[in-house]
Image: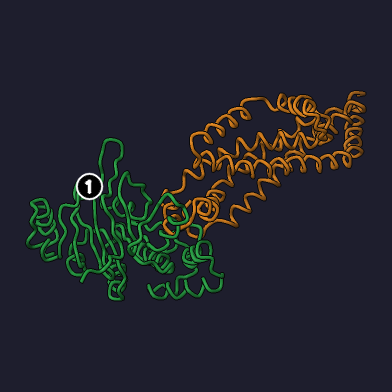
Amino acid sequence: MPGVGDHVVDMTESFIAIRDALPYLLHGSMVTIGLVCGAMLLGLALGIVLAVGHVYGGQVIRSVVGVYVWFFRGVPLLVLLFLFYFGLFSFLNINLSAFTVAALVLGLISAAYQSQIFRGAILSLPEGQFKAARALGMSDRKSICYIILPQALRLSIPAWSNEYSIVLKDSAVAYALGVMEMMARAHFVASRTYEHFPLYFTAGVMFLILTYLGTRGLGFLEKKVRIPGYAR
Amino acid sequence: MTQTPVLRIEGMTKRYGQKEVLRDASLSVNEGQLKILIGPSGGGKSTLLQCINFLVTPDAGRVWLKGEEIVRTQKKVLYEYRQKLGMIFQDFNLFDHLTALHNVTIGLVRVKGMSKQDARDKAVYELERVGLKDHISKYPAQLSGGQKQRVSIARALAMDPEVMLLDEPTSALDPELISEVLTVIENLRANGMTMVMSTHHMGFAREVADEIVFLEDGHILEVGTPDKIFLNAECDRTRAFCSKILELYGSA
């Protein structure tokens, strides 16, 4: 039965391929983590500003936020990556690494989504919270910083963890700019060794592990900052 | 002898679309006075109270605190003015993410710029005054309604207000919890705090108010001592309202 023997050899070769490529892929996971952290943090900072503008801003600010969200939610990631990397930054003669551009674009897109998460959370708070803050003599800025956002951000953690898993998966598209993250490295090795299945399988598993770790961490954070006695 | 009222409002008017919820309301409150606003729900009591500290922006109307007119368009003036008016809401509006203690300290630290230690000392003192010494590290969700309202009173008192505005402070409370809040308010009055309060507790109003203001359809229809309003009201509407209430709750 020659077929069975071939198969055993195949399996062994697959394991060898994975073993050989693993350090290289793990290095790529660091790049992926860097991309995702950068994008999520940029998205967080900008998302909060956009959400506050959307909820409390005047007509003009609200329209600006609306256009921003419409644009970054509407244009495909790949188009935006090329638009910024080959288009905008070349045109402006700004020299940024592919990694920086990818993190920036992922962050700008995430900001659009995160702004909607935070906006929903802010609007779900009772109106009386803001009123009570103002009644104490707080300015709008202080009321938002010390009363509204601490509560809204707590409420946002479950949706934020969802956004994290989306950004993590989207980060694989940075491969198209030549950023050497996990997907790019899996492809690089696979196209040379022809061991496609084991390499993409490994890359997939590594993405799953990162998703698991991130959502578990955020779940832990959610429990940790939960307001005692607060019915959820 | 004429004394300058602590708080004076004149011509307060508020419209929501076509509906005029407050029409040309004027009021003046002297030092240590307790004014109680009564009248049917939707009559403008809440709107009037919230127009006084501009939580609701009136369409017209002027306000003086200790003889000084408040220019609400100057933010700094507005924020300083609001510190001097303690506001108590019907549904408490405690900050849900903060303990009782921090509900009281946050205004002291973030608005008055007090040190954390001083703010803590002051907050503990105010919470003790309303009988919540043992609950300072609880979160709002862990407190009963009466306790929450007392925290909110402590929060307002900690800012050393000139006047307290109380918007139906007992309406959201279970009947057995009402008296604990009313007792705190009576103590405040005994200590000379100037207050404007809206309520449906006619018994309480009659017993402790210096003056009763009857509001209906956004109009102040009548102002007078409790005896005059409850026994000898000049206005038909006031009389009708009071007699209905008396019928419901027995003697006022």
At 50% from the left and 62% from the top, the residue drawn is B111
Residue B98 percent across, percent down from the top left: 50, 61
> Is residue B224 among what the camera can see?
yes
Q: How many marks?
A: 1
Chain B drawing hue: green
Q: What's under tag 1, amino acid-wise?
A: Gly
**B111, above or below B59, in the image:** below
Q: Quadrant where the C terminus of chain B lies?
A: bottom left
Which residue occupies the foreground of this view, A6 or A197?
A197
> Is residue A176 among what the camera can see?
no
Residue B7 percent across, percent down from the top left: 30, 62
Query: Would you say A34 lies left or right of B66 here?
Result: right
Quadrant of the rendered image containing residue A87? top right
Quadrant of the rendered image containing residue B18? top left
Q: Quadrant where the N terminus of chain B lies?
A: bottom left
Residue A36 percent across, percent down from the top left: 73, 41
Which residue occupies the foreground of this view, B129 or B157?
B157
At 31% from the left and 65% from the top, the residue drawn is B6
Chain A drawing hue: orange
Residue B42 percent across, percent down from the top left: 24, 47
Residue, disc 1: B218
